[in-house]
Image (cartoon, rainbow, N blue to C red):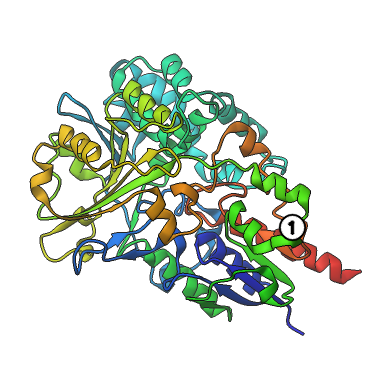
Amino acid sequence: MQPSAVVIGSGPNGLSAAIVLARAGFSVEVREAASEPGGGTRSGELTLPSFLHDYGSAVHPMAVSSPFLAELPLAEHGLKWIWPPASVAHPLDDGTAVMLERDVATTAAQLGEDRTTYKKLFHPLVSRWPTLAREFLRPLARVTRHPFLVARFGLNALLPATVFTRMAFQNPRTRALFAGWAAHSELPLESPLTCAFGLIFGISGHAAGWPIPQGGSQQIANALISVLKSYGGRVVTGSRVASLSELGRPDITMCDVSPHQFLQLGGCAVPRFYARCLQRYRQGPGVYKIDWALREPIPWKAKECARSATVHVGGTLEEIAASERAAWSNQASDRPFILLAQPTLFDPTRAPGGLHTAWSYCHVPNGWREPMLTQMEDQIERFAPGFRDCILARAVHNPEQMQAWNENLIGGDISGGAPTLKQFVLRPTWRRYRTPLRGVYFCSSSTPPGGGVHGMCGYWAAQWAISDFRAAHAR
């Protein structure tokens, strides 16, 4: 008799887990509460008809670096990546921008006295990126096969970004560029591990690029679903799971949900000790997100910003650090650090002829309800005077509204929990993705290796589940 599996949630991790299970011979059904599948990789018309926006993630360095996604024939299932000429643009007040170019030497040439240091730091790591990516996109408990490479990375990675940048770099341009990468951590830049995020996003920009999917991030989910169907699996949308008990007795249940949601799903069946662990799980900051329909491209003072789909808007290291620190102090910065994407410069399929879209968010305290529209648009105007004159329409989502469209985003937290050093190592889902409930596993970004569109949380969770299933049936 064919073993059965149910996956709750159709985000990239849930779909990845479903594919692994289906390939292993399980009958797989993915249950999705929303009317459209994809979780954080959905796209739709948020502003005006025919203007296509990404609801969640927009730019995907981790997707093209993912060992699991790389082994899937996603191109054959409709996914087409677009690589802008530069990975990231970081505009500054002098009217220029410092660019993360694909080539290490070209990037270093912009950095004055830091040129040699930058090349010495990044060249060895960029050349080993596929190996390094496999190392950090795996469960922490596994022993590394590349101790010297990991040590070379890890000696700096554990440092706070502010400490590392001031030790390693002299030029304010270099420090600002690195701070923008490190701010993807959602932690104060004075926190341990933030340097790791800076290094990872910098290395990936050189080695893999920061591409966008043609037609929007929904195309990632569509391709994964197509692969799943090729193995006999299926996705059922508009099918909310209120309790694990309603699923019957599948051999394996995979939960692409937050710890908070799991407590609701498990109810009184969740042992008290485990419930207490999940209740202590700490969420990270929320995001305040704005999408714009534009009559023309954003008029950056630094024209080179048009060479990248990703723009880090925030100025200096000190300003970015202040903005990220505020989100952890129950405050919002008047000059927020903004992650901005301008996909229609490279993908005209997302807007009517000659018109454009832009996508952006900044970090705010979890559950923040105060407006940030003026502060965000003021910050963009600082580096692109006349930006507001380009706006045809906008869609604004505060953290509460972000959670409303994707229930995994507790308080607007898009990373599945705060990646603090303690929680990164001792998260309540660290037990090889198992829960105390028989055959029930976590596979969301609240599990290792954490947030990002890479599918590796689902991949590893499904591998452990299959191993447990086979061991139990071998007895």
Count of picture labels: 1
Q: Residue furthest right?
A: 475
Between residue 185 and residue 310, name the one nearer to us.
Answer: 185
> Which residue: 48% across, 23% down?
190
Which residue is pictured at 38% across the width and 20% down the height?
116
Q: Which residue bears the numbered disc 1?
A: 270
Residue 151 appears left or right of 185: right
Q: Residue at x 31, y 31 (%)?
A: 107
Q: Position of residue 31 (x, y in %)?
A: 55, 73
For the N terminus, the image quarter is bottom right
Inspect the image, locate mark 1, and give the three-letter code of the amino acid beneath it.
Val
The percent coordinates of residue 221 (x first, y second) are: 44, 66
State whether residue 277 appears in this view.
yes
Q: Secondary structure at mark 1?
A: loop
Q: Quadrant of residue 247?
A: bottom right
In the picture, which quadrant includes the C terminus? bottom right
Residue 245 or residue 229, whichever sits in front:
245
Residue 38, x across and y down, in percent: 45, 65
Check disc 1: other Cα within 10 Å, few if <14, some if 14-19, many if 20+: some
Task: Locate residue 83 relative to residue 430 in the image: left or right.
Answer: left
In the depicted structure, whether residue 356 falls above or below residue 115? below
| x, y percent for residue 169 | 39, 17
At x 47% / y 20%, what residue is drawn? 164
